[in-house]
Image (spheres, grey):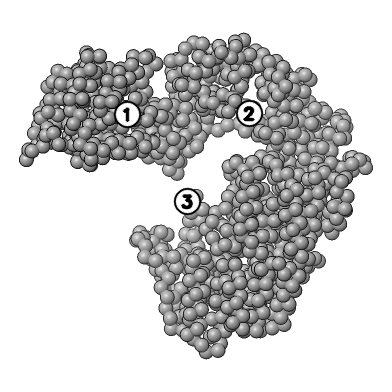
Amino acid sequence: MTPVLASSRDGPARAVGRNVLGKSVPPVRIHAHPLRKVRGWEEHLEQISTDLRRVVSDRRSRVLMVKAAPGGGKTRLLAEAATVADDMGFTIVGGVVAGPDAVPDMAHLPAATQVRVAGSSTDRFSSPRATSLVEATGARLRRAANDVPTVVTLDDLHLADFPTLMALCDLILALKGRPILWLLTFTSATSAAPSEQASMCLSRLRGRVAVEPIRRLSPLSNEALEQLVTDHTGSVPDPTLLALVESLNDTPSAVIELIRGLMEDGVICTVEGTLRLTPGTPGSSRDVNAVHVPAPVPKRLSSMIEENLLRLSDSTVKSLRLAAVLGSPFAPEELSAMLDESPAGLLTAVHEAVERGVLVCCGQNLAFRTESIWRVLLDSVPPPVRALLRRQAAETLLRRPDGAERAALQLVHVARPGDAKDLDVIAEGARRLVATDPTTAASLAIRGMELLDPGQDQRVRLANTAVKALTKVGRLDEAVTLARDEIEVAAAPTSVPPARDIAALQASMSTALLLRGDASAARQATDDVLARQAGGLPRAEVVITRLAASYLIGDSTAVEQARTILSRPDRRDRAVRVSAMTVHALDRWRTGHVVDAVGILRDAVALNHVGETVQVLDPCCFLAFALVRIDEFGEAEEVVRGYGRTTASTESSPATAVQAVLRAPLHLAQGQLNEAEQVARVALRQDGPYMPVFAPQAFLVLAHVALRRGTPAQAAIHLKALEGEGLQHSSSPWQAEYLLLQAQLAEVNDGPAAALEVLTETGAQPITPREIVLEDPAVAAWWVRCALTADQPEIAGGVVDTIEDLSKLNPEVPALFAAATHARALAEADTDALAEAGRLHRNPWARAATAEDRARIFLFRGDHESAITELDCAMNAYNQLGAEREAARVRAQLRGLGVWRRHWKQAKRPLSGWESLTETERKVAKLVANGLTNQQAADHLFISPHTVGFHLRQIYRKLGIRSRSALIRYDASRVSRPEAS
């Protein structure tokens, strides 16, 4: 054994990473000096720091033992621990066992190692000349004063022989009365020898000195793994690459080696700061319709995984290959049957695979730790043999009562076209999987269709299964396209599938059409289904879809149909009854019976069984919307949470988008603009589950947020996006709010008279004032305010009568009483009543508006002091809510009274570019870029046109432009960039 000893107060030297940049311009640059920070071992360092403090306080030695796999990072951990100790004032003594025949590696040690010796005014220097690591360490420690806190780091002690370890233990015990923390590391291996050596040290020291093991250096967490890759490449890995890297997450060194290898192979690249696989590389994309088969992996990763698998026993590798054919996860009894072994016979192989991180436990099943490991093992089975094994597995699984789904996943890879027996199993398996794994069900059904000729009965049934599954996971366009194509083929003269199968497919398509927001087409599809059934009892799915579609397109028979269903509850499916209750509740809401509507929706929620499929007439959704509109925020929050608990709201499920739609108006009503915008955008995202039928609510929330923030042009864009979203019918649940926002936008752009003009427009089925004021407790007062400002008191009186009638009709609703009090007080200029309304309002927007209304009345009466007090209250409230436009309006009124309130924030900004603009300059730039004149921009911001001109000159200077047209071009290019969006 040859010691390599170093001692320093500057911390250990850091090894330089191997230079792998052989290519002239590689797509990824490996950092030669990665960041110092250790990733994922914060708890280990905290344990070491705690023991360092104990050593100082107790003035006695402590021992920490570290065991890790080769390349597991124990040496790096020692280096980081030495740095921590150095920062705390400890003297560091470090040694590494290089093996009995090795030559000491002095390359990265200083020419002379530095030791701080107590009692010395200068540092002494010496070179490690001891022939034994223990002797050298002991000599160093004995030269230091007894009271000097010291850390001794001894690495690779698994290479030490028995006498050396005994000598080390004797040294530790001899110096146990000194403040020394001993950090001893051993490398774990498959043989028992290293474990025996570590155990021997433990048994010899335990009870005589404080000794404990450091928690095992386990694989890094996903966050730490991402940070490690980022440290060595300078780019954040995307989820696909991170999943691949996780397959080699046993040790940090393996991860770094993989990244370097992928870089050398040219299969990774950086795009806008994100590290990802180069397009066309195996694993860079996957077939969404692949049936229970993991994506291919890059050759470099495959080779490294294969190398790791070679360390396993032959029997374990054989078991893992069979398991790969079975799929992931798999039941142990399935593997036992395939191997023709008893469960006890699996124990050794499974134990080894779990210990080596190849398999993990998933409840009663086992699964491969990553899909990449699964894919490499699957590819190691020759295709002809794999086909035989799949058929054997299917036969084994079919003998189990619950094996149809698993058998189908095997047969789909080996079934021949037209094989009726295999296709029956595939069809049954796909049908069962719709409830538990719709993505796999869709892939299975689509693959089954490919094995059948167009128009065959089984193919139509498989298409129906695929459409149901695709609808459940939110792939609505695919569902509709597949259904239409199959229906068109089935209509050919040469094709005569049973009418009931076509009707079932059309019924499933109608649901997808409705969720896609195409209510008219959904209604037509249900009509076609009923025509095909020729008077038979309609399917529950058809009744529900037709009811919802009829209501959404303004068919007056929908409400009557709902009443008919509710009058005969015993003859209807529970889901049908719940849908009818929802339509009935929506009708009661429109007629102003708020208490009745909310009560019916509560009953419907209690009766409803919420599954994984998103429902258009889900009472949870409309109950949440109703509760938000009457300021019952607590109950609304519970309803939203309940929806999340009872639906499969994983990140990739449509229920996630619906939850976001429910939460967005709740955040908005509570004055949480940032949160409202964030969840509304989640509901509208195009790269994940998206429910177009609920999209109007998300767009309306975004329009509200834009208006509150003083960006009416952006609000107009959001409202423009709603055109063609089914809002043309007055029965749409969002039509009243849409009309209200149009009016509020008109007020911002053209004044109160324009808002009144929008609100008085009539159509074939006009939205009533009652529906408008029910949208928000602050709306009635806003409407009265517009009418009074436009000198139309008769309109103001009509609004007051409407909200008071609603309050009398629903005396149990505090929000309506507060709204009625507010509207009446404003119409009568009663400041005391306005104060009472402010106390009654639970809606923060309405509460802030009462203060502003009181200020206006005080100003009219000449009571400037009271007006300033109320304006300050209103401005503070608007600022807290993030309502920039309202706050600016109040500040303008205060300035008119000679009161100036600071509203800007000091911030460090660059000298040029968009980021150099102040908040006010950005607002001016956006307004002007949207085509507004200086006067119009001034009106929006409640400042003078001269101030707008001043801001424009600053904007031109900072952006390096000279004209309004250049500003328009600059803004367009900025918005089009990904980082701007």
Q: Disc count in the image? A: 3
| Image height of 705 relative to 529, above or below | below
- The first of marks 1 and 3 along the sequence is 1
Q: Nearer the viewer, mark 2 or mark 3?
A: 2
Q: Residue at x 7, y 38 (%)?
A: 120
Q: In this view of the protein, which residue sits in the foreground, 606 or 736?
A: 606
At numbered mark 3, what does the secondary structure look like: helix, strand or loop?
loop
Name the residue at 59% across, 24% down.
Answer: 365
Q: Residue 905, position in %: x, y?
A: 39, 66
Q: Residues within 10 Å of mark 3 (few under 14, many from 20)?
A: few
Of discs 2 and 1, which sits in the foreground?
1
Q: Does 331 sit above or below residue 785? A: above
CB within 8 Å, label 1 to label 3: no
Which three-letter amino acid code belongs to the residue tagged 1? Glu
Q: Amino acid at mark 2?
A: Ala
The answer to whether residue 408 of the structure is visible from this angle is no
Give the answer, above or below, for where 961 lies relative to 200.
below
Q: Secondary structure at mark 2?
A: loop
Residue found farthest to the front:
207
- Determine the CA span between mark 1 and mark 3: 50 Å
- Where is residue 19, by image quadrant? top left
Residue topped by disc 2: 290
Q: Is residue 915 left or right of 510 when viewed as pictured?
A: left
Tell me which corner region of the image, top left, top right, bottom left or bottom right, holds residue 510. Answer: top right
In the rendered image, which residue does mark 3 sit on?
Answer: 979
Residue 430's disc is none
Which residue is at 33% across, 16% downward?
196
Which residue is identified by label 1? Answer: 212
Residue 847 appears in the figure:
yes
Q: Looking at the picture, how far across and down is residue 860, in whole percent?
A: 56, 87
